[in-house]
Each structure stands twice: as structure tokens, then as C-alpha cells.
């Protein structure tokens, strides 16, 4: 334990906290000797893979762990007072007893007013039966004994403070977008002005612009109310954008404490691998380096460094007790590593495998996917019934989309949630018929009413779905799940041929050694392994086209690099054509040759990947690029606050982006923009496209867009 610490100097101080779960006859060593402090108005970030103990730490501090939890060492202090120790525990129970009642009574002033938490599943934590206003005003009624009219006013003020309009007060949760629901949760968390807000994965499952909005809201609230923030995520970019300093967790331990947010100073091998496994929009990376292996099980005490088995620099000293202890480098920089950076220059280190050289093949102009004026409309429903057949109740999910993908090419479709990306993928993937237009696959005009044609084409077109936890039948073994397309299409004459196809697909998807996976069930695999099963299932019929619909959005950051590298390998070595769908423009840059940008059903910009990234010409593409870069304050300061205000309802202007656009003029509300060509193969649907295209080429590219200069030159242009 720390000595000479004045706990009153900290809003929160965690001192040598260790914690265990008891599951049946087994112990799970969830946290081991965690020590850190948070001062007034300070923001710290905690990063690490799933299962490293981040959420357990957050819930231990909040005293809301289940009853099978035991605090085995250490204490947690809030404003100098002990709130967690071995006698109090860190759990919560609804069962009344003298001890439990006493603990709960002592925590009354800590919960809500002292420490509040934004949970990882915040999108599902609002009660669907009550309006937002009812749920928010109840906080003031029951916690502050406030009269209902005054509670309503306070709730409306809170909604305004997080950038939400007053109408949200009377809305039900299902009427709000994901980003709006998340902001409601944040408003509830800061409603009683707590000293500390714990944000546990606050941007999970949100698209990149909405993520950026949530980060900016948290930063503004910190400045306004002097709130301390502890942000927890596997998203390194998000945490570094919000924090003053970073801690890295692995296997229930803190393995590195960075004094700031500069990861270039990181010394622990795990920290460097974590950062280098992420595609970056501002850097050219030929090959991402995934973290091999899996985190250790915590059912046994680990002696020595927990990262030993996955580390490229491990030595025998790493197995020794004490090698896992944090050692101070300089100032407040601490690293738990016995080899780096203290290793002797003559030490024999495990050789790091060289990056494979990517063979870039020229893409021939041989279209295998062509859509012409592709459209899809849906009728609004009330419950199971269509409301009525009038035009006002039609949702135009995709409007006149023209897309071309050549053989052996990788093309990305990017945009926010609700832009129509998945709808297009389902039409191209032969899972849903269009309302208008035409789809041509492998030179064949698709007739969605011709079941035989669809059946035959599906052997050439396969889809990898977003959620690997729901797209695989939990009752099937891995062998049976992968074999299913072969059985349905009768592609194997006997069991031996079936087994050979399944094994080949598993090897192509890098599920090796195959014997380790064949007869397991999905629940026995990690998220990354399950997604590889989905890829193997798609590959087993030897498709010519793979449609990957957000294949990494549900995966841990350390698993994403492996999946992206696998998709690139399939394209480069097997000649598979890849149609990649994402809201993450950084991963689109890493994997694609060309990019289509989609907004509210329209393709608003298209071109080569480097042209789109370095010279984005549509204001919406600029917002996507800037949000992915994540420069503090850059998006709202550069593109204006309206960029975050997603349109509600159906009454959109002819230029659908006009209400959010920093350049919008009267013409944008009167006339739909044409699809202008600003360069070879670079098309933009914007009234100012020709001028913007010229200005962007003379600008410092997306990494430092000078919008004031662009506005001024646009006003002076003819």
C-alpha cells in the first residue's frame, strides 16, 4: 500500500485494491493490486481489452458488484472517506439486513451526488414505458424532495445543457436516436452535480460523428461543473481525446501509467501493440499488427508478468514473481515490465516476425457489382400494422444509388447509422428486393422473383454480418455451422468432401489448428474467433464476392486488426471482391481502394480512397474525416454545432444535409444538388462541389481544414 498519501487531496483514491469472484467452486481473480488517484476536475482514461477488469473496477468503486464478490486487499477512498474495503465489500443487495442497511445508509451521499456512472449498455437502460422527462424529473423528486413542477424545469435545463431540444422531454426512448439516448443518460448522470462521473464505454455502438459529440459533451460538462471523469474503453482514440492521462489494464492489473495522452512515450509491449492494432486515418500503414493469442484466464493466480505468453520480447525473468510490479520511469510514468525498457542491449529477445509484403495487383475494369438507380422504400408501421399507404408514411432508405465494384477490388461504403448502408448490403447480398432500379451481379441482371437464379447467385455472393454473437446458431458445433451452406447447396458428394471443404475454409479464415475448433460451440469462442467462423462459413462455398457489413464494430480493439488483415489477405491472395460497409472511415482507408460516402439514402461523394481522405469535398465527408482524426474541439469549431444535430422526421430539404451544413445557402433548401465531377473518378453531390474541389486541393488537406478561408473564398468566387 501507498504510504504518506493524503487521501483528502483526491476526489477518489484506490489503494492496493484486489478483488475476487466466487463462481461455483472456482475463484476468479478479477482485480490485483490496483492503485491510482483522481484529483478535482481531472480526467483519467483506462484502456484495455474486454475482460481486463475495467468494468469490474468501475462497479467496485460504485459499490454495485454482485454478492459473490470479495475484496481481498486494499481500500477505496472518496474525499478521504473509506467506501470500499474488506469489511464493507464492493457489492450491492436488495435483501435487507443490519449490515447491508448500514452500508447502504453510509453510501447514500456517495451515490448520485458523489459518484455517478454511465453504464456500457446505456442505450438499453432507459425505461421504454416512461417518457424521458418522467424518468429525469423522478431523480429530483425522490432524491431532492423537489416539487414536480420545479423538477420538470430542472430536467429541461439538463437536457438543454447536453444539447437536446425541449421536445425530447416528452418523447419516449424509442423515438430518439442512439446518440440522443446516450446524451439523456449523461444528463441523468450529472443531474445532482456529482464530484466524479465514471463513463464505462460511453460511445460503444455509436457512429463516429455521434461518438465525437458525446466526447465533446462530456468535456464541456467537465469544464462547466468541474466534474472529475474516469472514462473506460477499449477505444484508445476516444479515451485519449477525453483524458488528461491514461492507464492501461491487462488481466486485472494496471500494466502502465502514462503521465499524459501521448502514446508514443508508451514503453509496455502491450500498450504499443494495443495502439498499433488500430487503423489510423493520418498514417500510411501497410500492415496492422494484431495481438496474437488470447488474454489469460483469471481462475488461477498468475505468477510474474500476465502478458508473457503473448509478448514478442519476453524473457525468463518475466516468469519470476515481482516482474509484474509497476516501476517508476520518470515523474508519474510507471511501467510493469522487467524487460522493457530496462533490458540489457545484449539480451536474447524473441524475434518479431516481419510484416508480410503486400502484393498490389492492378484492378481491371471488370464490374462484378453494378447498381443503377437503386432505391428502397419502407412503409411506417404501428405495431404489426402499416399505418397507411400515403406518401407521407414512406421512408426512402436508399435513393437512386449508383455503385460499381470491379473484380478483385475492395470498395467501402461509409456513413452514419441510419444512412442506408445495411439496406444496400442486403439488396446486393440478395437478401432483400429493391423498390426500384437494378442490381447486376457477375454480369447477370438480378430478378428477385426468380428463386432459382437467386439460389445460384448466392454461391458467388456471401455476406459477413455485423454481430458474430447472433449470426451463428448457438446449437450448432463450429463444423456444422460452417458446413451449412455446403449442405444447403449440395456442393459435397460425401462426408469426406464436406469435411475437406470445411477444413479449407477454416484454414483460410485462420481458425487454426482446425482440430481445436471443429467440435466446439459458439459460446466457447471469443468474439474475434466467432467472426472468423462467420468468415469461414462465407468462404466455404468459394464465393467471388464478400459483403462485409460492419464486421469489426462488435469486436474488441485488439481483435479488429486480425479481421481486417484477414479480409485484405482474401482480397490480395484469393482475388475475392470485397464490399466493405462501415461508419469508421479509418478502417475504410486501410482496407479499400475506393470509397462511397452515404447520407440519408444518397451517395453524396465517391472516389479513390486517398482522394476522399486527403481532399474530402462534401461537408459531410469532412465531418467524418475530422471526427475520425479526433482533434480536440476541431469538429464543432470547424464545422459548427449543427453538424451534430441529426435530423428528426421526414421533412428534409432538397439537399438533405443542408440543416447540418456549415456552408448551406438558400439554394440548398430550394434545389437538390447535381452529382458533379471534381476530379478523375471523384464525384460529389453538393452545390459548391466545383469550388470546394478546387479549394481543397490547395488546402492543407483534411488534417487541418481551414474552413474560415474556404468560406471567405467561396463567398468571393463567381
Image: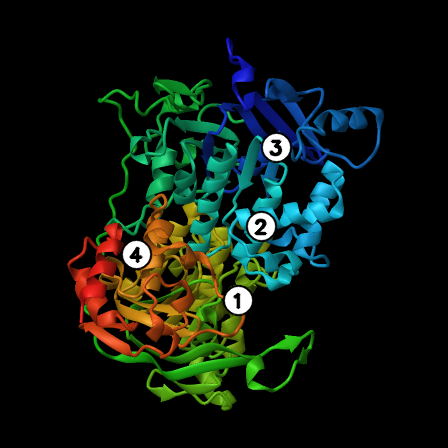
Crowd around label 4: few <14 · some 14–19 · many ≥20 (10 Å)? many
Q: Is residue 20 left or right of residue 596?
A: right
Badge 4 or badge 1: first in the primary sequence: 4
Q: Which residue is mark 4?
A: 590
- Which residue in the rendered view is the most extreme toward the right? 97
Q: Quadrant of residue 174?
A: bottom right
Q: Secondary structure at mark 3?
A: strand
**Residue 540 at least partly seen:** no
Q: Which residue is pictured at 35% across the width and 47% down the height?
A: 630
The percent coordinates of residue 178 (x first, y second) are 54, 57
Q: Earlier in the sequence, mark 3 or mark 1?
A: 3
Q: 129 or 557, which is in the foreground? A: 129
Q: Which mark is residue 470?
A: none
Check the image and report above or below for 497 versus 256.
below
Question: Callout 3: 10 Å neighbours few (<14), some, many (20+)?
Answer: many
Residue located beneath label 2 in the image: 159
Q: Secondary structure at mark 4?
A: helix
Q: Earlier in the sequence, mark 4 or mark 3?
A: 3
The disc placed on residue 648 is 1
Note whether 155 is above or below 9 in the view shown. below
The answer to whether the residue labelled 4 contacts the one labelled 3, judged by CB atoms less than 8 Å apart, is no
Question: Which of pointers 2 and 3 indicates the residue nearer the eye?
Answer: 2
Residue identified by numbered label 3:
115
Amino acid at each position: 500500500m501507498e504510504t504518506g498519501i493524503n487521501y483528502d487531496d483526491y476526489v477518489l483514491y484506490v489503494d492496493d485494491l484486489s478483488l475476487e469472484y466466487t463462481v461455483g467452486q472456482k475463484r476468479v481473480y478479477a482485480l490485483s493490486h490496483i492503485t491510482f488517484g483522481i484529483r478535482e476536475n481531472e480526467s483519467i482514461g483506462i484502456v484495455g481489452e474486454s475482460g481486463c477488469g475495467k468494468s469490474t473496477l468501475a462497479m467496485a468503486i460504485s459499490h454495485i458488484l454482485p454478492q459473490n464478490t470479495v475484496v481481498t486487499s486494499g481500500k477505496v477512498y472518496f474525499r478521504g472517506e473509506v467506501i470500499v474495503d474488506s469489511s464493507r465489500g464492493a457489492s450491492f443487495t436488495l435483501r435487507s439486513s443490519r449490515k447491508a442497511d448500514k452500508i447502504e445508509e453510509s453510501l447514500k451521499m456517495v451515490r448520485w451526488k458523489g459518484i455517478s456512472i454511465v453504464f456500457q449498455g446505456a442505450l438499453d437502460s432507459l425505461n421504454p414505458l416512461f417518457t424521458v422527462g418522467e424518468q429525469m424529473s423522478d431523480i429530483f423528486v425522490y432524491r431532492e424532495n423537489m416539487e414536480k413542477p420545479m423538477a420538470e424545469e430542472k430536467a429541461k435545463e439538463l437536457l438543454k445543457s447536453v444539447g437536446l431540444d425541449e421536445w425530447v422531454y416528452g418523447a419516449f426512448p424509442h423515438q430518439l436516436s442512439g446518440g440522443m439516448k446516450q446524451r439523456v443518460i449523461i444528463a441523468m448522470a450529472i443531474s445532482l452535480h456529482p464530484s466524479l462521473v465514471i463513463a464505462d464505454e460511453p460511445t460503444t455502438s455509436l457512429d463516429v460523428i455521434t461518438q465525437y459529440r458525446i466526447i465533446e459533451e462530456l468535456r464541456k460538462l467537465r469544464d462547466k461543473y468541474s466534474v472529475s471523469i474516469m472514462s473506460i474503453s477499449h477505444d484508445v482514440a476516444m479515451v485519449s481525446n477525453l483524458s488528461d492521462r491514461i492507464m492501461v489494464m491487462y488481466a486485472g492489473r494496471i500494466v502502465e501509467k502514462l503521465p499524459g495522452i501521448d502514446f508514443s512515450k508508451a514503453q509496455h509491449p502491450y500498450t504499443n501493440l494495443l495502439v498499433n492494432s488500430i487503423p489510423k486515418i493520418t498514417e500510411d500503414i501497410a500492415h496492422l499488427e494484431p495481438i496474437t493469442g488470447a488474454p489469460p484466464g483469471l481462475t488461477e493466480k498468475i505468477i510474474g508478468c500476465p502478458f508473457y505468453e503473448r509478448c514478442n520480447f519476453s524473457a525468463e525473468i518475466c516468469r519470476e514473481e515481482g516482474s509484474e510490479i509497476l516501476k517508476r520511469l520518470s515523474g508519474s510514468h510507471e511501467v510493469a515490465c522487467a524487460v522493457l525498457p530496462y533490458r540489457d542491449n545484449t539480451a536474447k529477445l524473441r524475434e518479431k516476425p516481419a510484416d508480410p509484403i503486400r502484393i498490389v495487383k492492378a484492378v481491371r475494369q471488370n464490374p462484378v457489382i453494378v447498381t443503377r438507380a437503386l432505391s428502397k422504400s419502407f412503409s411506417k408501421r404501428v405495431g404489426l400494422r402499416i399505418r397507411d399507404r400515403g406518401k407521407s408514411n414512406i421512408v426512402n432508405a436508399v435513393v437512386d444509388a449508383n455503385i460499381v465494384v470491379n473484380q478483385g477490388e475492395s470498395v467501402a461504403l461509409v456513413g452514419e447509422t441510419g444512412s442506408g448502408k445495411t439496406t444496400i448490403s442486403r439488396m446486393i447480398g440478395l437478401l432483400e428486393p429493391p423498390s426500384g432500379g437494378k442490381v447486376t451481379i457477375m454480369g447477370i441482371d438480378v430478378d428477385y422473383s426468380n428463386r432459382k437464379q437467386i439460389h445460384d447467385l448466392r454461391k458467388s455472393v456471401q455476406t459477413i454480418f455485423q454481430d458474430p454473437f447472433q449470426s451463428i446458431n448457438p446449437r450448432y458445433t463450429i463444423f456444422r455451422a460452417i458446413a451449412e451452406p455446403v449442405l444447403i447447396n449440395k456442393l459435397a458428394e460425401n462426408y469426406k468432401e464436406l469435411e475437406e471443404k470445411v477444413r479449407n475454409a477454416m484454414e483460410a479464415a485462420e481458425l487454426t489448428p482446425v482440430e481445436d475448433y471443429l467440435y466446439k460451440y459458439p459460446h466457447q469462442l471469443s468474439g474475434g474467433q466467432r467472426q472468423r467462423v462467420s468468415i469461414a462459413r462465407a468462404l466455404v462455398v468459394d464465393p467471388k464476392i464478400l459483403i462485409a457489413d460492419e464486421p469489426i464494430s462488435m469486436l474488441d480493439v485488439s481483435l479488429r486488426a486480425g479481421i481486417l488483415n484477414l479480409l485484405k489477405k482474401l482480397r490480395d491472395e484469393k482475388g475475392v471482391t470485397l464490399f466493405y460497409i462501415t461508419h469508421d472511415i479509418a478502417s475504410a482507408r486501410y482496407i479499400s481502394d475506393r470509397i462511397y460516402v452515404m447520407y440519408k439514402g444518397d451517395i453524396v461523394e465517391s472516389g479513390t480512397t486517398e482522394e476522399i481522405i486527403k481532399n474530402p469535398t462534401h461537408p459531410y465527408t469532412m465531418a467524418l474525416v475530422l471526427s475520425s482524426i479526433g482533434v480536440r474541439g476541431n469538429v464543432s469549431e470547424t464545422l459548427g454545432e449543427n453538424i451534430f444535430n441529426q435530423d428528426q422526421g421526414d421533412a428534409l430539404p432538397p439537399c438533405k444535409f443542408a440543416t447540418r451544413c456549415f456552408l448551406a445557402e438558400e439554394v440548398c433548401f430550394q434545389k437538390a444538388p447535381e452529382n458533379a465531377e471534381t476530379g478523375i473518378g471523384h464525384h460529389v453531390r453538393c452545390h459548391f462541389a466545383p469550388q470546394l474541389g478546387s479549394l481543397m486541393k490547395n488546402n492543407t488537406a483534411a488534417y487541418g481544414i481551414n474552413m474560415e478561408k474556404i468560406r471567405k473564398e467561396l463567398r468571393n468566387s463567381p
